[in-house]
Image (cartoon, grey):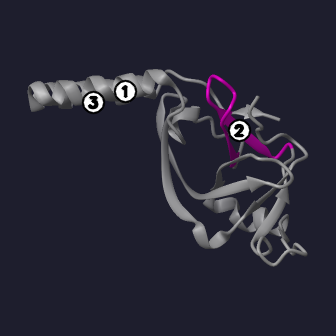
Amino acid sequence: MAQIVEKGDWIKFNPDSKKEETIKWQQDLGSRQEQYIALPYSVKDKEASGSLFIQLGLADSFFQKCQKDESSNPLVSGGYKIQVDEAFQYGQNNEKTLRFLVYHNKANKPYQHRFIETTAFSNIGNKIVSVGAGATPAWGELLKKGADLAKGFIGDYLRDF
């Protein structure tokens, strides 16, 4: 069985590897969007890793909870670490072998796939759109609009620890 991050685990990350992402979703019949910082993480003392998304507006409070990672091994020291607690939410694939973390205002309710496409259905949907676009560009655009609309209302919410 694959190891995944759990509540209580310490994760390690390097802020230099960050990139900003805009996450868009539908909530309360309206369009929403937030800026997030995306970082890869690894779990200390486990063979597990994933992606970490930090809401840009909460970056200061997130980094106040972090500690400098000062391992005795110079090959792995550096970066920062934080303990996963109830402030995090997570998303995962259906097989529960891949997990990503989100640190944000939990009043935000985007579906998991808004962060990472995790299900076979979304891969099939992307294939259908590409095939449709190959047949005629108009069909491809229509299918893409339909897929984007469906994604706003179908999916799994992020989970609490």
Q: Residue at x 78, y 69 (%)?
A: 80
Residue 89: in magenta span = yes
Q: Residues within 10 Å of mark 3 (few under 14, many from 20)?
A: some
Label 1 vs 3, first from the N-terminus: 3
Three-letter amino acid code of the residue under disc 3: Lys
Contact check, label 1 and label 3, Cβ < 8 Å: no
Q: Identify the magenta region.
A: 86-102
Q: Residue at x 77, y 37 (%)?
A: 3
Q: Residues within 10 Å of mark 1 (few under 14, many from 20)?
A: few
Label 2 vs 1, first from the N-terminus: 2
Residue at the disc numbered 2: 90
Q: Residue 76: x, y in percent?
A: 78, 70
For numbered disc 2, what is the local secondary structure?
strand
Three-letter amino acid code of the residue under disc 2: Tyr
Q: How far apart are the alpha carbons under marks 2 and 1?
A: 23 Å
Residue lying farthest to the bottom in this orientation: 74
Q: Quadrant of residue 151?
A: top left
Where is 156 relative to 5, above or below?
A: above
Foreground of the two, 157 or 27: 157
Residue at the disc numbered 3: 144
Q: Nearer the viewer, mark 2 or mark 1?
A: 2
Foreground of the two, 133 or 110: 133
Contact check, label 2 and label 1, Cβ < 8 Å: no
Left or right: where 143 falls relative to 48: left
Figure disc tally: 3
Q: Quadrant of residue 161?
A: top right
Three-letter amino acid code of the residue under disc 1: Leu
For numbered disc 1, what is the local secondary structure?
helix
Q: How far apart are the alpha carbons under marks 1 and 3?
A: 9 Å
Q: Residue at x 78, y 64 (%)?
A: 61
Residue at the disc numbered 1: 149
Q: Quadrant of residue 54?
A: bottom right
